[in-house]
Image (spheres, coloured by chain):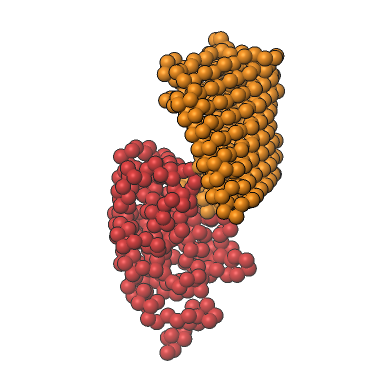
Chain colours: A red, B orange
């Protein structure tokens, strides 16, 4: 598999605090790469930095997408090149219908969307098109519904790399199953997936995983091994220094 | 092309429906002080009389018990670059009457145009009046709209107004609406305006919930940028048992625009309740970045969010 994303020595500082420290990771086309770690360890910040969100520009390091250094590209430019991000807590849009919302990403990538495409995408996320297409993407939809609609919009966008920030949080069991199927679809379509998750079920879909702790990559490898290490060997780090933590564990 | 055709064209360009040849749909087309077209339907009477230069007295009456099936279309406007249009409007709905009016005001070539409306509206017992008003002022900002309405609502009557100006410049808009509600009457006034450059928007909407179980909603959503300014004053008073109302004002600003919201709520009876919300700020960054992550640029994303807000 070819590399779609290469992160080299990424450092992110927010309000004078180091959030990400020397992150280096590679993701291949069609690979599901999971990122796990404790709350507040920098997983979402990594997602935002990769997507180029305002306020999350790295202090140093490089991000290569399809072999192009993209650190100076805007969010829009990155998206138009085929990168996108699904938020942990999807935004609400007053007065914007599900139909309009679903078409946005596809149109910006030059994909012509027809009614049958919209219906297909919604069915993929277990949403009945007739009931939802004319509804607004606002507070009348639950967080789980908005999450599934966001994924449907990404399906229609046909990106090359998707960053999913905790797609499993706040959704019911059935929806979780659907989200899993969508991740499999992405994989089949040779789309790279950076999957931030706390769920063992989601982790089963991953080809590779990285454990992030205190803003640093602690461990990269087989998802099951990385997860078990996190669950059974990890402890809260007082100083958030994973290297020292690893040394302590090794000495023990 | 004659004035009538030009007005109809401007009306259609502003989003109006093509209803002028439909015999089941009443309409009136008024350019400055000239009535260019009029069609009535059973139960509805519309009289327009030139009173003074540039001034038209317009009477709209719906007879008792009549429910006008199709929305009545009114097209007001000024075609030349300069002009004044003053409309003195008298609306009377008889008991149990019902009507929806779609009013489009178009000033496509305006450089210095003033449109003035003074309305007295009386809604008899159990009548229902829906007034949907859409404005298109062109791109020069040379339009001044001054609208004043005194509204009397008898028991069980209902009024819904929606004012929209979503495309083009505003110029200057000044509204002053005041409604008095008897028992079980219900009013809902919605305003949706988008402005830029040095547009000036002044909204004053007042409703007095005088009767038992009267209901009122005053809801303004304004989006402005550049050097535009918006002042929104919403006042809702409740002075009878079970009278309830809500005031909601949302304003989005960009650049050097200035927005002011003054919600005033006054409750004079222990069993009445009025609530209010007001929010002024920039476009929500999460919304913006979500759309940008789907490939829209910042301007396109802002437009979509603002148009969505103004639709809501």
* Residue displayed at 62% across by 66% down: A15
Position of residue B53 measured from the top left corner of the image (x, y, whole percent):
70, 14
Q: In which image quadrant can residue B147 be found?
A: top right
- From this viewpoint, is residue B299 visible? no
User: Would residue B230 appear left or right of B286 to someone viewing this image?
Assistant: right
* Residue displayed at 60% across by 43% down: B210
Classify the position of the N terminus of chain B by image quarter. Answer: top right
- Please tell me how many numbered marks the rendered image carries: 0
- From this viewpoint, is residue B76 visible? yes
Whether residue B104 is situated above or below residue A199 in the rendered picture: above
Whether residue A154 is situated above or below residue B35 in the rendered picture: below
Q: Which residue is outermost to the bottom?
A: A252
* Residue displayed at 67% across by 14% down: B51
Whether residue A140 is situated above or below residue B7 in the rendered picture: below
Position of residue B105 measured from the top left corner of the image (x, y, whole percent):
58, 25
Position of residue B174 measured from the top left corner of the image (x, y, whole percent):
68, 33
User: Would residue B146 appear left or right of A130 to someone viewing this image?
Assistant: right
Q: Nearer the viewer, residue B220 or B197?
A: B220
* Residue displayed at 57% across by 43% down: B211
Q: Which residue is outermost to the top?
A: B2
């Amino acid at each position: 598999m070819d590399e779609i994303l290469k992160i080299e020595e990424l450092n992110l500082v927010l309000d004078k605090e180091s959030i990400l420290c020397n992150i280096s990771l590679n993701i291949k086309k069609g690979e599901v790469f999971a990122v796990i770690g404790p709350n507040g360890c920098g997983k979402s910040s990594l997602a935002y930095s990769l997507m180029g969100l305002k306020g999350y520009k790295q202090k140093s390091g490089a991000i290569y997408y399809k072999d192009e250094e993209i650190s100076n590209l805007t969010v829009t430019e990155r998206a138009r090149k085929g990168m996108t991000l699904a938020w942990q807590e999807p935004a609400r849009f007053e007065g914007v219908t599900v139909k309009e919302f679903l078409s946005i990403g596809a149109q910006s990538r030059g994909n012509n969307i027809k009614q049958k495409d919209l219906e297909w995408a919604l069915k993929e996320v277990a949403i009945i098109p007739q009931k939802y297409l004319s509804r607004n993407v606002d507070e009348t939809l639950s967080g789980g519904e908005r999450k599934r609609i966001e994924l449907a919009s990404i399906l229609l966008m046909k990106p090359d790399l998707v960053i999913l920030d905790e797609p499993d949080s706040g959704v019911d069991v059935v929806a979780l199953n659907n989200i899993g199927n969508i991740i499999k679809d992405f994989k089949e379509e040779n789309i790279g997936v950076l999957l931030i998750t706390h769920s063992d079920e989601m982790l089963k879909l991953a080809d590779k995983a990285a454990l992030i702790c205190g803003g640093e990559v602690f461990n990269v490898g087989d998802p099951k091994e990385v997860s078990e290490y996190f669950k059974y060997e990890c402890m809260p780090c007082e100083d958030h220094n994973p290297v020292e933590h690893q040394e302590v564990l090794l000495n023990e | 092309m004659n004035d009538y055709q030009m007005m109809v064209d401007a009306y259609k360009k502003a989003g109006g429906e093509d209803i002028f040849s439909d015999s089941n749909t009443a309409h009136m087309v008024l350019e400055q002080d000239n009535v260019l077209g009029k069609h009535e339907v059973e139960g509805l009477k519309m009289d327009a009389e030139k009173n003074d230069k540039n001034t038209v007295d317009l009477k709209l009456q719906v007879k008792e018990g009549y429910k006008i099936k199709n929305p009545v279309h009114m097209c007001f406007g000024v075609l030349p670059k300069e002009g004044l249009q003053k409309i003195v409007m008298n609306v009377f709905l008889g008991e149990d009457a019902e009507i929806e009016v779609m009013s489009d005001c178009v000033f496509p070539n305006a450089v210095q145009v003033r449109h003035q409306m003074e309305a007295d509206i009386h809604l008899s017992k159990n009548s229902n009046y829906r007034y949907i008003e859409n404005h298109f002022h062109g791109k020069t900002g040379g339009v001044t709209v001054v609208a004043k309405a005194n509204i009397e609502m008898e028991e069980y009557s209902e009024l819904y107004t929606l004012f929209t100006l979503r495309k083009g410049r505003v110029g200057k808009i000044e509204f002053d609406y005041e409604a008095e509600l008897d028992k079980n009457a219900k009013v809902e006034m919605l305003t949706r305006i988008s402005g830029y450059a040095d547009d000036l928007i002044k909204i004053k909407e007042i409703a007095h919930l005088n009767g038992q179980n009267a209901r009122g909603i005053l809801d303004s959503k304004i989006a402005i940028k550049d050097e535009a300014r918006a002042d929104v004053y919403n006042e809702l008073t409740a002075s009878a048992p079970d009278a309830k109302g809500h005031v909601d004002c949302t304003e989005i600003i960009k650049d050097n625009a200035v927005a002011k919201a003054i919600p005033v709520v006054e409750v004079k009876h222990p069993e009445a309740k009025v609530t209010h919300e007001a929010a002024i700020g920039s476009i929500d960054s999460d919304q913006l970045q979500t759309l940008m992550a789907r490939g829209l640029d910042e301007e396109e994303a802002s437009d979509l969010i603002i148009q969505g807000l103004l639709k809501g």
